[in-house]
Amino acid sequence: MTTPVPFLRLTDVHKSFGAVHALRGVDITVEAGTIHALVGENGAGKSTLGKVMAGLHRPDRGTVQVQGRTVDLQSPRDALGHGITIVAQELALVEPRSVLENVYLGSEPHRGPVVRTRLLRRWFAELTERTGIAVPPDACVQDLSIADQQKVEILRALARGAEAIVMDEPTARLASHEAEGLVTILRQLAASGTTIVYVSHFLDEVLQVADRVTVLRDGQLVSTSPADDHTADSLVEAMVGRSLASAFPAKQLPASAAPLLEVENLGRDGVFAGIDLEVRPGEVVVITGLVGAGRSEVLQCIVGDRRADHGTVRLCGATKRFRHPRAAVDAGIAYVPESRKTHGLLLETSVNGNVSLPQLKKLTRGLSISRARERELVAAAITRVGVKAANPALPVSTLSGGNQQKVLFAKALSGDPVLLVADEPTRGVDVQAKRQIYDVLVDLASRGLGVLVVSSEMEEVLGLAHRVVVMRTGRVAGQLAGPDITEANIAALAFDRPAGGSPSNDAGGTS
Ligand SMILES: Nc1ncnc2c1ncn2[C@@H]1O[C@H](COP(=O)(O)OP(=O)(O)OP(=O)(O)O)[C@@H](O)[C@H]1O
Ligand SMILES: [Mg+2]
């Protein structure tokens, strides 16, 4: 008996970007039909390694073997030719088209100039049947949830003959029940022979889904071992080189002063209605609920990123109607939006430029910007949230995903806010950086700021909140404070189920 040939073997792989040595001699073997996780802190080199596997980066040194043969993957197309593709951190679908079109884009069967739609439909039916991944073929991709868009990406990869799929933080933008669905799909794919390389910061999820786990630190391989040999704590220790005391800072009791932020009967037609909430100085209020419950839209209406149709927003007692987030910033609201790509950052601008952007007025004397003051302000802001940037004069696009998130935070905090509003503040951020962001939030609150956060992560809600606002389908389903903040109570409100766990029988209860 011979041992099976591994699907992928990378030997002594190096990759540098200018002065940054992102991969330093990595050896990794990925067996066919397994789920192989890559974990590590922000900037450890996970995405870079995934991109080398998928032909997006060529290694400076080292070899890549696919099914025992040495290959030179010069492009994603090349990699796909060898059966490897990547589902990136940000999805890449052609949105205004149907699911069917997205899955087969560029590989449609033709008869003359005409696409053979009936044949396509048959292929699609076979593919969904074989994989157990269900998405309606005629739905427009932009109307789908992130979870369904991701399924379309996976189907597309499979339709193009991918035998190995690199998934870079696939669950970072999913609600927990959607993440479980994805995990089930990936397990099924692996069982039928597809090889999955899985990048994630959710360690419990990694331990649940992966067969083997590779830990990277500063571009080097720390270890590869069976998932069964690890616990979440042992992974953290391997990632950061020491054990971490606890994930959350201690909660401090908020002062019982007049509210900083009062939201009354806020509504946006067709999205949410009747939202009442308050944030007091020193208080961390977390809005949670299922993805799509309208949480982000509520924040956006508060800070003027969208128009509310009803209701009032008061800041420090004064009624406000912000027409633009800039106006909210000027009034003392620091806003960290959900998507760093589309809302928060100018990716091709330097870290310095991004962080100081909201403060340009303060930094300008006459017609010139004081570069020295800018550097000072930026240095203070990025140290505070622990951004790892080799050189803050380089574009934000050169930072790892998690470090981009921290830049967003540094930018929001560079002013002198009275209220911090943040949408999924730790998405894509590693355990240590999460703790840094939590420390920042708790520190701000202890200095009398109000903190209003949208979060889907149960741990985070439980660990941070003085008060929890649970939203369900555009309404406040309930608010919880102090000892009532429990996982069972939150889930009961979010899913409209009694805390006991059995489904409710009233109208609108889902089955
Ligand atoms: N195109 C690039 N240009 C310059 N530097 C880069 C580029 N891509 C990655 N880097 C750098 O390489 C290092 C590794 O980045 P990588 O994106 O692989 O990290 P990661 O482990 O995926 O982190 P995260 O968890 O934050 O996504 C980082 O220091 C990053 O700044
Ligand atoms: Mg990454």
Image (cartoon, grey):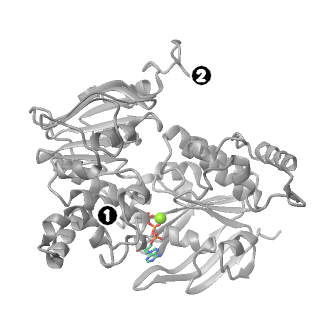
Instruction: Say above or below: 166 vs 75.
Output: above
Element marked by disc 1: helix
- The residue depicted at 19 percent of the width and 63 percent of the height is 359
Instruction: Say above or below: 103 vs 263.
Output: below
Q: Position of residue 410 (x, y in %)?
A: 26, 61
* Quadrant (top left, top right, bottom left, bottom right) of the N terminus: bottom right
- Answer left or right for 129 relative to 290: right
- The residue depicted at 72 percent of the width and 52 percent of the height is 101
* Quadrant (top left, top right, bottom left, bottom right) of the C terminus: top right
Could you tell me if the residues under marks 1 and 2 are in contact, i.e. CB atoms within 8 Å?
A: no
Residue highlighted by disc 1: 407
Three-letter code, disc 2: Ser
- Answer left or right for 409 relative to 119: left
- Answer left or right for 476 relative to 384: right
Count of all numbered marks drawn on residues in the image: 2
Instruction: Say above or below: 61 vs 470.
Output: below
Three-letter code, disc 1: Val
Q: Nearer the viewer, residue 257 or 250?
A: 257
Q: Residues within 10 Å of mark 1 (few under 14, many from 20)?
A: many
Element marked by disc 2: loop
Residue 155 visible in rendering: yes
- Answer left or right for 325 relative to 447: right
- The residue depicted at 86 percent of the width and 56 percent of the height is 114
Residue 144 visible in rendering: no
Q: Position of residue 164 (x, y in %)?
A: 69, 63
Residue highlighted by disc 2: 511
Q: Position of residue 362 (x, y in %)?
A: 13, 65
